Amino acid sequence: MLRSGAQGSAGGGLLRKMTANEIYNVLFLCTGNSARSILAESLLNHWGQGKFQGFSAGSSPKGQVHPLAIELLQRMNLPAEGFRSKSWDEFAAAGTPPIDFIFTVCDNTAGEVCPVWPGKPMTAHWGIADPAAVEGTESDKALAFRKAFKELETRIKLFTSLPIDSLDRMTLQSRLREIGERSTAAESS
């Protein structure tokens, strides 16, 4: 998990300490990289500003971001520009930002064989139902996107509030899993 050149502690390998010039890089993975991972990237860049930098990618990118994802981000006054559907291979290549955390946001991606990530980032599964797969009226589809957005926002707020620099690796890994295991019922209340 430690970046090259980062310092660990004798007490269990804490993540590197943040400095004014460094932030934690987080990669959200989904199969198509068109909806959930895009929403998560934008949400993290909003709620984690100055502490985290969000990225997203997919194992089989759709090639375009779902229009309802962009529309929802705009409606919520969150970053909605510059997103593109891209392969997770881009983040396993040399010269890319070192990734500290990887969260899978769909069940399909959680079961896939992922690339080898440089630096051994911490990982957790934060499964969210795919709003892009919802069929029905435009209202049904919009509701599915809002539900996914709310679930991701709740988890990201919990994540960004963690005292990362004071947690040992095992405790932090446990907290990341707990966030991903939150029931949707608890998030919708």
Image (cartoon, rainbow, N blue to C red):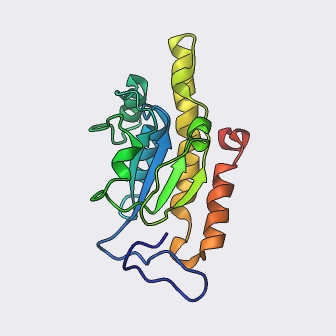
Tell me if 179 is positioned left or right of 86 in this view.
Answer: right
Q: Is residue 103 positioned above or below 132 on the image? A: below
80 vs 134, nearest the viewer: 134
**Could you tell me which quadrant the C terminus lies in?**
top right
- Place of residue 12 in the rendered image (x, y in percent of width and height, measured from the top left): 60, 82
Residue at position x 49%, y 74% in the image? 15
Quarter location, residue 175: bottom right
Q: Is residue 85 above or below residue 99?
A: above
Pinpoint residue 57: horizontal percent, then vertical percent.
41, 42
User: Where residue 161 sits: x, y (%)?
Assistant: 54, 63
Q: Is residue 79 left or right of residue 10?
A: left
Please give the name of the residue rendered at 30% of the width and 58% of the height, measured from the top-left corner: 94
Is 68 on the left-hand or right-hand side of 114? Answer: left
Using the image, determine if residue 43 lies above or below residue 146. Answer: below
Asked whether 90 or 178 is in front, the reply is: 90
| Rendering coords of residue 76 (x, y %) | 41, 36
Q: Residue at x 61, y 32 (%)?
A: 129
